[in-house]
Amino acid sequence: MRHLARARSTAGLQMKTNREGRNCMSEMDRRAFVGAAAIGSVAAAVLVASSAEAAGQSGYFVIAEIVSKKDKADELRALLVPFAETSAKEPGCIVYTLMEVIGEPGRFLTFERWKDKAALDAHMVTPDIKAIVPKLEPVLAKPFTQLFLDARTGG
């Protein structure tokens, strides 16, 4: 009898049934699921923050994902932690949170809330950002990604 008897697709994930009849995900599918869940959780945090913390106000949000090469997690962390601390003190920055995914050393997400797009634009041309960008390339597993969100309130 084969260890994995059959496979079926459920919500885009490859589910397999082991010999005890229980569903299980392959390791690769589990990583994809965890990654999607992490990004979804951050997106949910943005929505909660924009409605609870910023009721009646608009804001400009950024979620970024920055992933190191397997052997470069410490180097990336050493670059990002001081950068996040400095960025949080910039004019127009309301929140700048650097998070590392538990169980995935070297995979970071930022949750940023800026007063408006102009404040973010000013951040994007600071000497600090100009200094860090060239240092990131040698330690990244893939180009970093950014998701820009403009919070709007009804009225």
Image (tube, grey):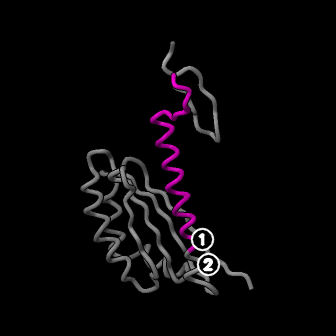
Mark on residue 51? Answer: 2
Q: Give SS at disc 1.
A: helix
Q: Position of residue 55 (x, y in %)?
A: 61, 84
> What's the distance in space between the residues labelled 2 and 1, CA to CA?
6 Å
Q: Is residue 61 left or right of residue 142?
A: right
Which residue is drawn at the image coordinates 39% and 58% (left, top)? 108
Q: What is the span of residues highlighted in magenta in the rendered image?
A: 19-48
Residue placed under numbered mark 1 in the picture: 47
Q: Position of residue 80 (x, y in %)?
A: 32, 65
Return the residue nearer the eye: 7 or 75: 7
Return the residue nearer the eye: 91 or 48: 48
Return the residue nearer the eye: 86 or 111: 111
Q: Is residue 97 left or right of residue 59?
A: left
The amino acid type, in three-letter code, at marker 1 is Leu
Q: Position of residue 30 (x, y in %)?
A: 48, 40
The amino acid type, in three-letter code, at marker 2 is Ser
- The correct choice, above or below, for 9 with respect to 11 in the image is above
Q: Position of residue 120 (x, y in %)?
A: 49, 77
Q: Give SS at disc 2.
A: helix
Q: How many marks?
A: 2
Q: Marks 1 and 2: in contact by CB < 8 Å?
A: yes
